[in-house]
Image (cartoon, helix red, strand yellow):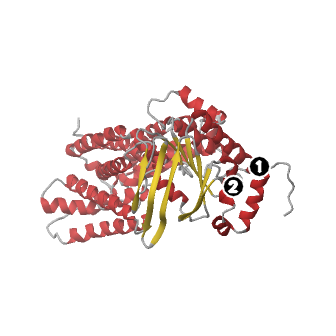
């Protein structure tokens, strides 16, 4: 049954949307959108590394994302540059370095568009494994860190005084985000990854009275977007990754039309 | 040098960041059931000093003593919750400690006089309500020491008097020490046992009456200090008339 490419795409996309929900909520609460972008932009460098070392390309992307997350974590603690400046340097630096290193490998022919905007219709069984095992592990770890992470999101110093190991939890969280971003890459591509984190979470905000509900609703809206985008792409032969993002935006716009008073809104 | 009644002590704290000397030879201690207020102008290092004594910031030199087993209730200066973060007051309070029952959360909020916002969203609180919620969270730690960073910030004058009275009441009911920071001069003086006047170093310290008549303090605050002195005088002798 998994031979059907459309079904594989749907299973992979749903898996990514489920993982993206709770992570996306934290990205929105903690204003990490630019951070996610920066990690995603390093993906090409990971692909180049994969070819160079003859390892699995997804593994290459994960390794580079983790390295970059670590560098950013250390860089932010130095406080020499404003956060967004630091991210800007790493973001565009990583993307350009990736493109340049691939140019140095004349034997390597890759479909650049597939990496930039995703290639969900080409998802294979090994990709599904990455999504469900790698992404699943990230999600389980996030649940394990849930309470301390929320405490840090509310107020870092307060959490520290109350006994939360802030540095450790933050470091682990960034590593998990890096893993998630790397796994999501296949579906919407490195330029659109953060959209699948942010848009469903932003949609969920209006219908949520607590953080857990918002995380769950973000997953639900993410799944709707993936299904809608895949359907539209099949129907009108449009590029799939962007179609999913357009679907997510449509869900967001529709949600605004629903009167907010119908839901409790703490 | 510290006896058993000392909750917290700072010894010769120096903090240098880059080329800036933020704290210079700061030493003080706080005893059980004592209210100590750190006052000083903006940029005097008040919040920095609090962060050092809470061990959130490592000083360049000097040491911090916490009485073993002492629990601290901390009230930060401001809370910057993103508007997208759905959080009720009840849920916010539950983060104070593991396994807190709803009843205990309500009791703490009752004690600070803000039980009416129990189910509200954190982002919808007024300045005074937010301070009371933050204070309730600090109380849930069953603190031996309350550390309050500008506890009356964003509160009108009437509310400020009430909050200082509340802090005084909590001190006598719970028997905890209180270390707070304030840049307000007028109201805090009546609510504190001891004042540390900070301007990177400790200019002067002692009872409110001692500090306000100290030349160092008057130099720091100029005519404001004299005004304050009158006010203080006024608080002690309600019947006297002023010729300013």
Q: In this view, does B199 lie to the left or right of A105?
A: right
Circle 1 crowding by C-alpha within 10 Å: few under 14, some 14–19, many from 20: few
Residue wearing tag 2: B209
In the image, residue A154 sits, relative to residue B209, either above or below, namely above
Query: Residue A37 in the image: x percent, y percent?
Result: 38, 59
Query: Residue A18 in the image: x percent, y percent?
Result: 37, 40
Residue positioned 50% across, 36% down in the render: B141
Can residue B221 be seen here? The reply is: yes
Q: Check the residue under mark 1 and report the chain it is in.
A: B
Residue wearing tag 1: B236
Front residue of B168 and A9: B168
Q: Is mark 2 on a helix, strand or loop?
A: helix
Same subunit: marks 1 and 2: yes
Q: In this view, does A121 lie to the left or right of B203?
A: left
The answer to which quarter of the image holds residue A257 is top right
Q: In which quarter of the image is the C terminus of chain B?
A: bottom right
Q: Check the residue under mark 2 and report the chain it is in.
A: B
Disc 1 to disc 2: CB gap under 8 Å: yes
Can residue A25 be seen here? The reply is: no
């Amino acid at each position: 049954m998994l031979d059907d490419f459309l079904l594989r795409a749907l299973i992979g996309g749903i898996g990514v949307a489920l993982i993206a929900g709770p992570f996306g909520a934290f990205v929105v609460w903690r204003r990490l959108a630019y951070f996610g972008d920066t990690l995603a932009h390093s993906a090409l460098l990971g692909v180049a590394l994969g070819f160079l070392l003859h390892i699995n390309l997804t593994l290459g992307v994960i390794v580079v994302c983790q390295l970059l997350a670590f560098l950013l974590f250390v860089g932010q603690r130095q406080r020499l540059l404003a956060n967004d400046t630091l991210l800007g340097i790493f973001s565009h630096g990583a993307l350009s370095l990736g493109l340049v290193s691939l140019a140095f490998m004349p034997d390597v022919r890759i479909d650049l568009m597939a990496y930039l905007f995703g290639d969900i219709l080409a998802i294979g069984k090994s990709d599904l494994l990455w999504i469900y095992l790698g992404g699943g592990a990230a999600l389980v770890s996030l649940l394990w860190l849930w309470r301390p992470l929320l405490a840090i999101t509310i107020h870092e110093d307060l959490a520290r005084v109350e006994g939360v190991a802030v540095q450790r939890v933050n470091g682990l969280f960034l590593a998990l985000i890096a893993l998630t971003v790397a796994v999501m890459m296949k579906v919407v591509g490195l330029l659109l990854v953060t959209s699948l984190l942010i848009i469903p979470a932003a949609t969920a905000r209006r219908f949520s009275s607590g953080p857990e509900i918002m995380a769950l609703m973000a997953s639900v809206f993410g799944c709707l977007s993936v299904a809608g985008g895949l359907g539209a792409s099949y129907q009108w032969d449009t590029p799939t990754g962007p179609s999913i993002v357009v679907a997510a935006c449509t869900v967001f716009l529709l949600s605004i039309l629903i009167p907010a008073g119908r839901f409790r809104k703490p | 040098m510290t006896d058993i009644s000392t909750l917290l002590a700072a010894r010769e704290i120096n903090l240098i960041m880059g080329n800036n000397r933020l704290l210079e030879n700061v030493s003080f201690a706080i005893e059980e059931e004592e209210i100590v207020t750190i006052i000083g102008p903006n940029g005097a290092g008040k919040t920095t000093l609090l962060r050092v004594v809470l061990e959130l910031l490592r000083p360049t030199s000097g040491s911090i003593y916490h009485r073993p087993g002492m629990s601290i209730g901390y009230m930060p200066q401001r809370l910057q919750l993103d508007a997208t973060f759905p959080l009720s007051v009840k849920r916010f309070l539950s983060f104070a400690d593991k396994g807190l029952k709803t009843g205990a959360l309500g009791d703490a909020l009752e004690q600070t006089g803000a039980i009416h916002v129990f189910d509200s969203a954190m982002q919808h609180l007024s300045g005074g309500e937010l301070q009371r919620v933050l204070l309730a969270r600090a109380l849930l730690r069953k603190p031996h020491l309350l550390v309050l960073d500008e506890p009356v910030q964003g509160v009108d004058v009437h509310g400020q008097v009430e909050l200082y009275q509340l802090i005084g009441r909590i001190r006598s009911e719970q028997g905890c020490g209180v270390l707070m920071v304030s840049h307000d001069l007028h109201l805090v003086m009546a609510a504190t046992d001891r004042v540390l006047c900070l301007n990177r170093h400790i200019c002067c310290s002692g009872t409110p009456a001692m500090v306000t008549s100290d030349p160092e303090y008057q130099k720091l605050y100029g005519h404001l200090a004299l005004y304050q002195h009158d006010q203080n005088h006024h608080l002690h002798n309600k019947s006297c008339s002023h010729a300013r």
